[in-house]
Amino acid sequence: KKAETEMAKRKADREAGKVPTKDERFAMQSKKLDEQIAMKAEMKKVLNDEQFEKWQKMHEKRKDNFKHYRKNLKKEKRR
């Protein structure tokens, strides 16, 4: 739900023509990284070592797949 509200806010800003400043972009990235660190810590607390390793590998693979998907999406938009 948090992601949906953030996406809606960014979409409204984009439609209004508002571009985030350097400081706002930095704050967004910082917030995102803090949330990732908190999620990783929470997962480490819940899972045992073997499960945590498996989760990390899965998470990295998913992130890589998403990067390729976005790259291909950008190529499709150019055509």
Image (cartoon, grey):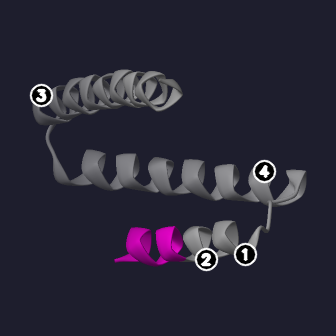
| Secondary structure under the numbered disc 2 in the rendered image | helix
| Picture disc at residue 8 | none
Spatial separation of the CA atoms under disc 3 and disc 1: 48 Å
In the image, what residue type sits under mark 3?
Glu
Q: Amino acid at mark 2?
A: Ala
Nearer to us: label 3 or label 1:
1
The kind of secondary structure the magenta stretch mainly shows is helix
| The magenta segment | 1-8
* Distance from Cα at disc 3 to Cα at disc 2: 43 Å
* Residue under the point 18% across and 32% down: 49
| Vertical side of 38 occupied by 57: above or below | above
First in sequence, mark 3 or 1: give its number.
Answer: 1
Which comes before the other along the chain, label 1 or label 4?
1
Q: Are marks 1 and 2 in contact (CB under 8 Å)?
A: yes
- Residue beneath disc 3: 50
Q: Per the image, is 70 magenta?
A: no
Please report the residue visible at 76 percent of the width from the left and 53 percent of the height from the top: 25
Under mark 1, the amino acid is Ala
Task: Tell me residue 72's x, y (percent).
Answer: 38, 22
Say if mark 3 contacts mark 2, CB within 8 Å.
no
